[in-house]
Amino acid sequence: MGILEVKDVGKRFGGLQALGDVNLSVKENSVHAIIGPNGAGKSTLLNCLVGKLIPDTGSVMFDGQSVLGRSPHEINQMGISRVFQTPEIFGDLSVMENMMIPCFAKRDGSFRMRAIENTMREKDVVEKAEAMLVDMNMADKRHMNAASMSRGDKRRLEIGMCLAQEPRLLLLDEPTAGMARADTNNTIDLLKQISDERDITIAIIEHDMHVVFSLAQRITVLAQGTPLVEDDPENIKGHPKVREAYLGETAA
Amino acid sequence: MLGLNNKDTKLLIVVAVLTLLAPFILNPFPAGSAMAQFNAGYPDLMQRFVIFGIFAIGFNILFGLTGYLSFGHAAFLGIGSYAAVWIFKLFTYNVVPAIALAVIMAGLFSVIIGYVSLRRSGIYFSILTLAFAQMSFALAYSVLSNPKFNLTNGETGLQVYADDLQMFHREGLPDLPHLFGLSMRSTYNLDIGAWSFSFNAGYYLCAVVLMLVFYLSIRIFRSPFGLMLRAIKSNQTRMSYTGLNPRPHTLAAFVISGMYAGLAGGLMAAMDPLAGAERMQWTASGEVVLMTILGGTGTLIGPVLGAGFIKYFENIFSKINDSILHEWFAFLPDGLENFMVFIVHPFVGKGWHLTLGILFMLVVIFLPGGLVEGGQRIGKWIKNRGKAKDSGATTEPAE
Amino acid sequence: MDGLILQILNGLDKGSAYALIALGLTLIFGTLGVVNFAHGALFMIGAFCAVTISKILNISYEVIDPNQTDFLGNPLKVKTPYVESWFGPEMGASIIDWSVPLAILLTIPVMMLIGLIMERGLIKHFYNREHADQILVTFGLAIVLQEIIKYYFGANPIQTPPPEALQGVANVGAAIGMDLPYPIWRIVYFCFSLGIIGAVFAFLQFTTFGMVVRAGMADRETVGLLGINIDRRFTIMFAIAAAVAGLAGVMYAPINPPNYHMGMDFLVLSFVVVVVGGMGSLPGAVLAGFMLGILESFASTTWATTTLPGINQIIIYLVAIIVLLTRPRGLMGRKGVMEE
């Protein structure tokens, strides 16, 4: 029994069957990659996991509880954090403020009116956010406006913000899309380090095979809305069906 | 001090000093002089500065922090005024219960209106609040003033009549709104040489309230709640995916700013015990938007500056007529004088709104940060110039 | 039955005005993605075009007529409009009489020019700014336009009668055996509006220009990628929307004597119409315009106002709130259009 259990999930958009009978099981404390060609339904699946979309059929269980019908913030409070393809951060706020918000969310829940307290005097949150910035190697940027950072730094900040919530499952949607090689490698190292040091499960959607094979312990291949095969990385590499559906395309 | 950092404490002290000494500051010209028309230190106008300041501070908590642009905040101001006048009519002229009820009623209405309007964001939210405000205006103006059930007294406006109940009104208390016996109209005039300064009880009540709510708004801005509101403005997607529910946050901000508006409405009624529907019209809602933007959205002091600026110039500009213009341009040759008067004429007197409209457009286009940003830019420029002279350096170190 | 139909008819003229303004608003929303708070002011300027034309046509010279005297026995000054002296008294008088329909000729170029200047001079710079900023700057512009009109025309409503031939009341139900007295000018206004609505839809449906604009409304970026200069078309679209608002205004002048704040009054309601119809949906705007006009007319009957006093003043807002809460996209709104 994995921490995330997806059973027979299907989703239609009008006449288009985006997902059909997807089954997926993510083992606790593993790194699980979901790959597949464009239009395979990877993003749709991800959106079904985080509450942005509600599947037409099937069930999604996280740690024994159904996530279906819950709104994104409820699912997040259950312990699922999401990293977006283009970094979603609070661009108008400083890096430190960005980091403090998830710390507050972790401590105070989805809504608690603390309108009189002084933010900077909430010692526990300030300390935690600062420690997190040190972990993410961006303590020197704490007063910077988040929008003015480089893309790599934004990605780093976003991952840090997700980690600050101490999630049990971290979902990443093509975290290295549009990144330079050096930034991609940094991100891989960061994710490796996170997976090694923390008690966390990582599910990653990725295009870049280099990223997938340097991180994943288990891989699911999606094609046309259904899982083609689920296996360990070494077996996936040689799998004829996968070559045909996916790797063949990229190799050509 | 008071749980604020140094910078905020300084700001609060500046505001306190300015409001407390306003009767001096706003009357810099001797009473009889030609410049006396630029004086603004009379009770009625000073009260308006402060009351609209409170209104704008509240509006800024919603718009400045969350970015939700309400076009219907005047409705809460009107509700506050009506509530206060009803207290005067039924119970007592004491302003404390009147203002308290004004805040409570505005709070209740803002919970309802906010709950509905905040189901949508962006333009939809603006239009929904606009629709609610226009509906409130129509309700107050005609629907709730029929003979069977007269809550607002329609066009005439709600006021206190001699035969009203006034249960707790006693002999010896002033027949006007008062604070435990101190009439809001009582004014002490201090004459120093040619200067004359008025100290009005009503104004000082408003001033004290302003300081309190300004302090409260600083606390909100610096609180975790304020941080969450700014997060909503910045990125609602990230907000939800960080496990935070944006809706109760925005609703709380909406209700707080509605209560500020109710407080302003209550104070307005306390200064002059009547309430009219025109206070709720959407042009009135537009006015507070103008004040906030003009002063500087999302800044602490901006709304107060904007309110003061608009109310001051409204007062001055409206008084200027052609003969005053002729006086000003008298130094020019005749033809040129007439020409200048002709040019300036549309913008003064009744044309104040034209000036305001143009000014507002210019601010939105060129100075989105309002007067505060303007001040900062000028400050920087002066600093840079000073530096250039001192050391020959031409640029500020990058931030 | 007669009464029912009469109420529907009564709602049509206001409904037409709402529909025309809402149509323009939607065109601007849909194509430029801009919320135009100054659109009501354009409607108002249209109405004042009618006033201007009738003033211009009435410019007169005075001659002292020795044959007539006033009650003091002085020779009487007789005013003769130039038009009458140029075209002869009869022809001249009828030109003056028909000043409102004639004003249409002026309104179209004037409004298109104003639209062009507005878009190129102001709106263009706000495409990439927040909606709040667009609302604010057009709101400021609306104040400015309205104050300019107030400065030149004063604060009081100006009576602008329709041509004599189109005054009075006709029984529109005569053909079907019903008694439906209805002001002729309102019939004219309704037909005129239908004509304009039809023209706009035909233009969008059957011309290449319209096709590009419709495509742009659906997906602006892609059309831009096709190498079509979408911006210039949108400028023209803005001018057309301005002209539609102006035409709605010019013909409305005889129904509601123009005053400087009529634009704002109609704007608020037209926004509600757009929202009810569904942001970005042209048929929705037209449908909702007529629907709300008729609804308002029903709420204004004596029966309705005695049962629920003032219901006529709040009905539209109530409906809007209910529609928005139950169908957040409006009656005919499409997913993904102006949603945020």
Image: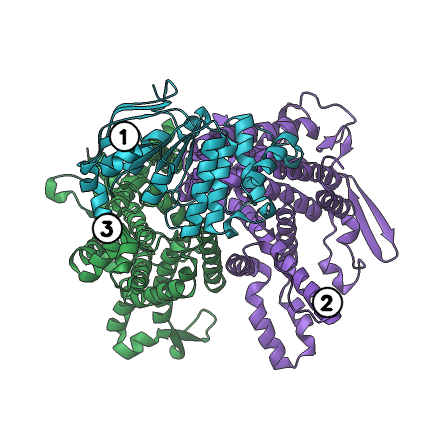
The quadrant holding residue A9 is top left
Discs 2/3, front: 2
Q: Chain of mark 3?
A: C
Q: Which residue appears at 76% of the width and 34% of the height?
A: B183
Chain B colour?
A: purple
Q: Which mark is residue C190?
A: 3
The quadrant holding residue B377 is bottom right
- The amino acid sitting under disc 2 is Gly
Residue C15 location in percent, x, y? Answer: 29, 45
Are labels 1 and 2 assigned to the same chain? no
Element at badge 2? helix
Q: Nearer the viewer, residue C266 or B168?
A: C266
Give the vertical position of A186 relative to B181 (above or below): below
Q: Which residue is mark 1?
A: A231
Chain C colour?
A: green
Confirm or deny contact between disc 2 and disc 3 (CB under 8 A).
no
Is the residue marked by circle 1 packed among few (<14), some (14-19), or many (20+) residues within 10 Å? some
Could you tell whether B91 is left or right of A178 in the image? right
Residue B298 location in percent, x, y? Answer: 58, 46
Q: Chain of mark 1?
A: A
